[in-house]
Amino acid sequence: MQIDWEVLKTEAIKAMQNAYVPYSKFPVGVAALTEDGRVVSGCNIENASYGVTLCAECSMVSDLFRTGGGRLVAFYCVDKHNNILMPCGRCRQLLYEHSAPGMLLETVSGIKTIDEVIPDAFGPRDLEARA
């Protein structure tokens, strides 16, 4: 599958522009390509009760399921200056859960696989293998 990283970047920027960030003032946008060729996206949505704030990756996974589910094959994340961001550990785990094997991420240090950014992760494949 051909990955157009510019399309993912553009969609992540569009999503970031819709972020709701009255507290941190740190908008984040993400976009990913699915196995069937759809592009899904998301932005962070803050809440005065900080614990219920939604990260951009959560918002994107909601969009993934809203548009038919599937697995992610490529991912891009930006800040308000359109700079690439590396997802935090929690978000890497969320991405791993919904990734196709070998999913690619554009990172601050180049393109990496999901297994490189969250080595020895535990996820659905482990549950299936150990059931």
Image (cartoon, helix red, strand yellow):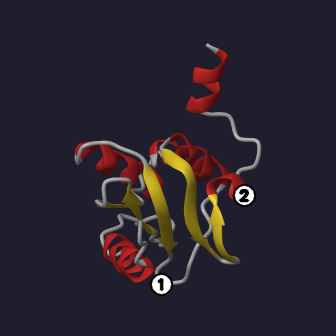
Q: In the rendered view of the protein, which quadrant contains the C terminus?
A: top right
Identify the residue at horizontal 47%, vertical 72% (top origin).
25
Image quadrant occupied by the N terminus: bottom left
- Count neighbours of disc 1 (C-alpha within 10 A) and say few if under 14, some if 14 to 19, many if 20 or more: some
For mark 2, what is the residue? 116
User: Quadrant location of residue 31?
Assistant: bottom left
**Helix, strand or loop under label 2:** helix
Above or below, 116 relative to 124: below
Q: Earlier in the sequence, mark 2 or mark 1?
A: 1
Q: Nearer the viewer, residue 15 or 24?
A: 15
In the rendered picture of this protein, how many numbered marks are placed on residues? 2
Instruction: Work out how far the residue at label 2 is from the one at label 1, CA to CA, in angstroms.
Output: 23 Å
Residue 74 percent coordinates (x, y): 48, 63
Which residue is labeled 1 in the image?
82
- Residue 54 in sight here: no
Disc nearest the viewer among 2 and 1: 2
> Farthest residue toward the left?
67
The residue drawn where x is 63% and y is 55% is 114
